[in-house]
Image (tube, rainbow, N blue to C red):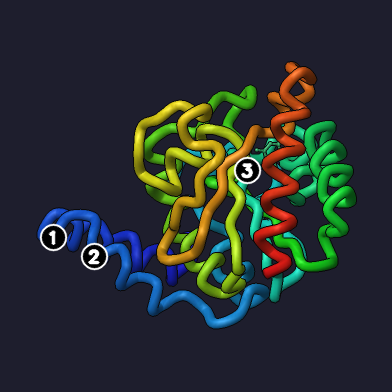
Amino acid sequence: MSKFLQKNSSYLNQNSQLFGNEIILELDESFSGNLSSFQNQICNCHNCPLGQTRTNFVFGEGDPNAELLIVGEAPGEKEDLEGRPFVGRSGQLLDKILLAINRNRQKGTYICNIIKCRPPSNRNPNREEIDQCLPFLKHQINLVKPKLIVALGLVAAKNLLNLESSLKDLRGKVHSFNNVPLIVTYHPAFLLRSPGFKKEAWVDFQKIRDFLKD
Ligand code: URA
């Protein structure tokens, strides 16, 4: 573990015992000030057991000044091997959808995940992994300063919005994450399994396109 993470993890443990999770917000101040230095600062993280099993830390990628920031669930096998988000089959579908709204990873879009390391066998991320990783994502969002966040799937939506609802209830509304508008839609992996929902996803992405026009 780096000195930075050692220092902050004992700080966090000590303070969460005293004050609960609110103190985590203060940690943000010791994170670095641009995306690439922040990536260097956290990429050797071992705050949770996934640090032992990952091949690569998947920080996220895209336009550092993106208006649209997309959050998925967790790196899968291909992402873990390449160290890049959404490079497998669901990533190919996501790229097609982005193209349909005149965007791509280099242009106006930033892509990342709720957690930065692959859970073994692609299981859902657990509470500890999410709690350790979410402060990183929050800082990343603060650095990009997007106009809109899109949560792909229920894991991303529930953990950003901190509520228990169905995807059906969360779609079709503009929520807010730290004062940034947030829209929920289907995860592309779900769309690959259930192509019948692509129509509804297209409705969501047209709304996303129109939101970003204003
Ligand atoms: N699924 C995700 O949620 N994220 C990725 O990066 C790849 C697949």
Residue beneath disc 2: 23
> Within 10 Å of the Cα at label 1, are there few (<14), some (14-19), or many (20+) other Cα atoms?
few
> Within 10 Å of the Cα at label 2, are there few (<14), some (14-19), or many (20+) other Cα atoms?
some
Q: Residue 84 at what x, y percent from top left? A: 76, 51
Q: Residue 8 at what x, y percent from top left? A: 35, 66
Q: Amino acid at mark 1?
A: Phe
**Secondary structure of residue under mark 3:** strand
Q: Is residue 90 left or right of residue 208?
A: right
User: Going by the picture, which residue comes out furthest to the left?
Assistant: 18
Q: Amino acid at mark 3?
A: Gly
Frontmost residue, 32 versus 172: 172
Q: Is residue 189 left or right of residue 148?
A: right
Q: Are marks 1 and 2 in contact (CB under 8 Å)?
A: yes
Q: Amino acid at mark 2?
A: Ile
Q: Nearer the viewer, mark 3 or mark 1?
A: 3
Q: Residue 117 at what x, y percent from top left? A: 60, 44
Residue beneath disc 1: 19
- Residue drawn at point x = 82 percent, y = 59 percent: 105
> Which quadrant of the figure has residue 200?
top right
**Alpha-carbon distance for marks 3 and 2?**
26 Å
Mark 3 or 1, nearer chain start:
1
Mark 3 or 2, nearer chain start:
2
Ligand 1 within 8 angstroms of badge 3 C-beta: yes
- Residue drawn at point x = 19 percent, y = 56 percent: 16
Residue beneath disc 3: 72
Quarter of the image where the C terminus is located: bottom right
Compared to residue 48, the image places residue 89 above or below, namely: above
> Which quadrant of the figure has residue 14?
bottom left
**Alpha-carbon distance for marks 3 and 1?**
30 Å
- Residue drawn at point x = 72 percent, y = 23 percent: 197
